[in-house]
Image (tube, rainbow, N blue to C red):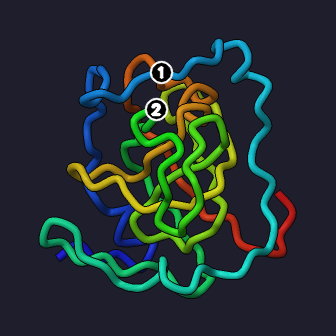
Amino acid sequence: MAVQSESTESERKPPVAATAGGFYKDDGPGERPLAELDTIPDAVPRREPLHRWANRPYEVDGSLHIPMRQWTAYRARGVATWYGRRYHGRNTAQGEPYDMYAMSAAHKILPLPSYARVTHVGNGRSIIVRVNDRGPFIGEREIDLSYAAAHRLGLLRSGSAEVDVELLLPGKDY
């Protein structure tokens, strides 16, 4: 059972190695030039009502995930990956179309919707994403980033990287 509700539990996990990269199945880069992705701004945190159904406990491949339903501190270090054109236009866990060119992400337990700061441990780059989907469900990955977010962090080519994830609480200035 993969239940994670406190940040201290996730901080104690042993680090998961990032992989050498490559595209998953038929996923891959988008049509827009990479230089255009540099102009996409970070998500701007704002207070939004929590999604009615996307924050209920759920099970994937025999693992139970219990999303956070209250605004409490969350910080974790783990592996980030990205998803692109394979899912572009498909509905996210909260029913919005996935936009690979938006600064968004998928997380197993962060509230939907919410905002998170993601920092690439290796290069120090930091971005703010809107968390509007569930995942990743492969191994012990911490967060799945949109194509644009992965580009801005500098992990498109490698496919994954070690990152720090911090939930941004509503009502604070970031």
Q: Residue furthest left?
A: 62
- Residue 29 is labelled as 1
> In the image shown, does 93 or 144 lie closer to the viewer?
93
**Vertically, is 24 above or below 21?**
below
Residue 79 lies, in percent from the top left, at: 37, 43
Q: Residues within 10 Å of mark 2 (few under 14, many from 20)?
A: some
Residue 91 lies, in percent from the top left, at: 49, 57
Q: Quadrant of the C terminus?
A: bottom right
Mark 2 vs mark 1: which is more N-terminal? 1
Q: Mark 2: which amino acid?
A: Arg
**Vertically, is 70 above or below 118?**
below
The secondary structure type at the circle numbered 1 is: loop
The secondary structure type at the circle numbered 2 is: loop
**Vertically, is 134 above or below 48?**
above
Count of labels in the image: 2
Q: Residue at x 47, y 23 (%)?
A: 156
Q: Residue at x 35, y 71 (%)?
A: 9
- Marks 2 and 1, how far apart at CA: 7 Å
Q: Residue furthest right?
A: 173
Residue 100 lies, in percent from the top left, at: 57, 37
Q: Mark 1: which amino acid?
A: Pro
> In the image shown, does 164 or 102 lie closer to the viewer?
102
Task: Report the residue marked by disc 2.
Answer: 85
Q: Residue at x 32, y 49 (%)?
A: 141
Q: Quadrant of the N terminus?
A: bottom left
> In the image shown, does 122 or 40 lie closer to the viewer?
40
Mark 2 and mark 1 residues within 8 Å of each other at the beta carbon: yes
